[in-house]
Image (cartoon, helix red, strand yellow):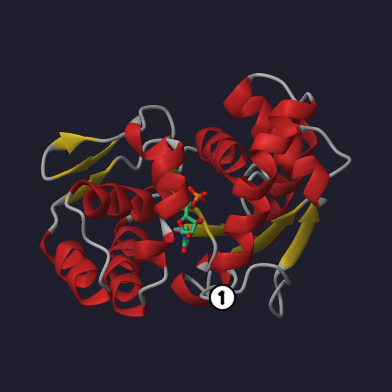
Amino acid sequence: MSVVAIDGPSGVGKSSTAKEVARRLGYQYLDTGAMYRAMAWLCLNRGVTDPVDVLEQVRGADLEISLSPDEFFVSVDDIDVTEEIRGEEVSANVQTVSGVIDAREELIEMQRAYITAAPEGIVVEGRDITTVVAPDADVRILMTARDEVRVARRAKEVHGNADAEAIAATQDLVTGRDAKDSATTSFLEAADGVFTLDTSDIDFDQVVETVLQLVKDSQ
Ligand code: C5P
């Protein structure tokens, strides 16, 4: 059983890379950001912001997430939130959950259970996978890209283009979230033994090939 851990800031292409690598290797895929997003959706829905109440919601929620790179879904208490969790409201409020250490512990425990139970292997992506969730992973990668590259990628995803207006609308969402996230998780610098993969000037296929090669080298 092989574990591939991928961390990085928003807009760096972690999800598409992790999914494609999982597909190519026949591994499971775990999007830990989707878990934080689903819990943030729940808290928003219930008007919960106090950390003690957030923890209670996270403890009481029935969170289900697909581990298949081909059919992705997330549900909370049997409500499918796959689409809603990608919205701007959840993105802007996700730290209501991810900033609460005890709530993180709950989700980290679930993440470790998924990793342990993976039959062939699993590709796990997030912010603290290489350092906290799976520091013993077979392959540990920090994906990076220059700020302007990440903002342009996210602008294309959200607005369909990267013109000046789309860039202006996306800038704070990307770099602002990273600044807040780095208060709780350390993903801007690679920890010891973590491979830094700068994706600024290489295309998607090259990124995937590099990760596949690292997996091969680890076996
Ligand atoms: O990766 P994604 O952008 O979907 O993550 C959403 C949010 O979830 C991040 O901005 C961060 O606050 C939180 N997160 C985290 N630790 C992880 C994954 C995501 O704190 N391992």
- Looking at the rendered image, the quarter that the N terminus falls into is bottom left
* Residue 148 left/right relative to 18: right
- Front position in the image: 7 or 114: 7
- Front position in the image: 62 or 98: 98
Residue situated furthest right in the rendering: 201
Query: Residue 5, position in %: x, y?
Result: 55, 60
* Residue 159 left/right relative to 150: left
Residues packed near mark 1 inside 10 Å, few (<14), some (14 to 19) or many (20 plus): few
Give the quarter of the image for residue 182.
Answer: bottom right
Query: Residue 43, position in %: x, y?
Result: 24, 55
Query: Residue 49, position in %: x, y?
Result: 27, 64
Query: Residue 80, position in %: x, y?
Result: 21, 33
- Front position in the image: 68 or 218: 68
Q: How many marks?
A: 1
Q: Which residue is mark 1?
A: 183
Q: Residue at x 53, y 75 (%)?
A: 136
Asked if residue 29 can be seen in this view, the reply is no
Vertical position of residue 161 compared to residue 69: above or below: above
The answer to whether the residue bearing label 1 lies less than 8 angstroms from the nearest atom of ligand 1 is no
Vertical position of residue 157 compared to residue 151: above or below: above
Q: Residue at x 62, y 57 (%)?
A: 176
- Looking at the rendered image, the quarter that the C terminus falls into is bottom right
Q: Residue at x 21, y 77 (%)?
A: 52
Vertical position of residue 7 compared to residue 42: above or below: below
Residue type at mark 1: give it.
Ala
Q: Residue at x 35, y 69 (%)?
A: 108
